[in-house]
Image (cartoon, helix red, strand yellow):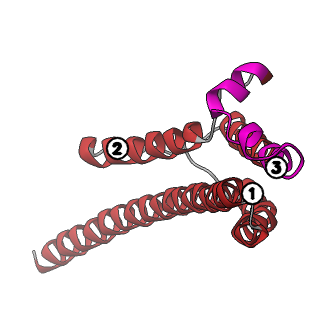
Amino acid sequence: VILWIFVTTALVVLGCIFVTYQFGNQVLRAHAREQIRREVIIDLDEITSTVKDAETGQRGFIITGDERYLVPFNDAVSRLPTEIQKFKSMPRIDISEADVERVIQLVDQKIAELRRTVELRRTAGFDAAALPRWTRRRAAGDGRDCSTVRRLGLRFQDHRGRDARDGREVP
């Protein structure tokens, strides 16, 4: 009888240890996935912020013609390759390679547009550079901008939030 109670108790303890171990591993995997998602969101935010810094410098230069306003523009343009390389090389969950390439393409297009308008301001003056942006894009056949990058980040954050609310584990 004592042996049977001991064996039963031992089996219950071993079962509890196994279940606790499995749940612990599940929590650790979920935490690792969320950390990766957070890092992707942070990287997207950094890229978006850097593009905004470039836009701010470009806008100041277009309005004033003062080369000092190009300091934030040049600084942002020099930071972007490092930020993009970091974004490309990190592990990703719920973001496809096509999305990553789309972000890179949009950032490159935006920087090219900013450079064109800076050059327009230098060569053709304020009026040419201040032409409404949508008109320049329409003429160039380019109706996209970096708001798509922001939408991708928001979609990614929303996906993470839905997973947490649903209690689903997404690999």
Q: Position of residue 10 (x, y in %)?
A: 25, 75
Residue at screen point 72% across, 28% down: 136
Whether pointer 1 and pointer 2 mark residues with C-beta atoms closer than 8 Å, the reply is no
| Residue 101 visible to an observer of this rendering | no
Residue at screen point 57% across, 36% down: 148
Give the spatial CA distance, label 1 vs label 3.
18 Å
Q: Position of residue 137 (x, y in %)?
A: 71, 27
For residue 7, what is the image quadrant?
A: bottom left
Q: Out of 13 and 109, give the one closest to the viewer.
A: 109
Name the N-terminal-most of marks 2 and 3.
Answer: 3
Segment tinted magenta in the rendering: 116-139
Residue at screen point 9% across, 74% down: 1
The residue to which callout 2 is attached is 163
Q: Secondary structure at mark 3?
A: helix
Residue 133 sits above or below residue 119 on the image: above
Q: Out of 95 and 14, give the one closest to the viewer.
A: 95
For residue 96, what is the image quadrant?
A: top right
For residue 97, what is the image quadrant?
A: top right
Q: Position of residue 108 (x, y in %)?
A: 78, 44
The residue to which callout 3 is attached is 115
Label 3 neighbour load within 10 Å: few <14, some 14-19, many 20+ = some
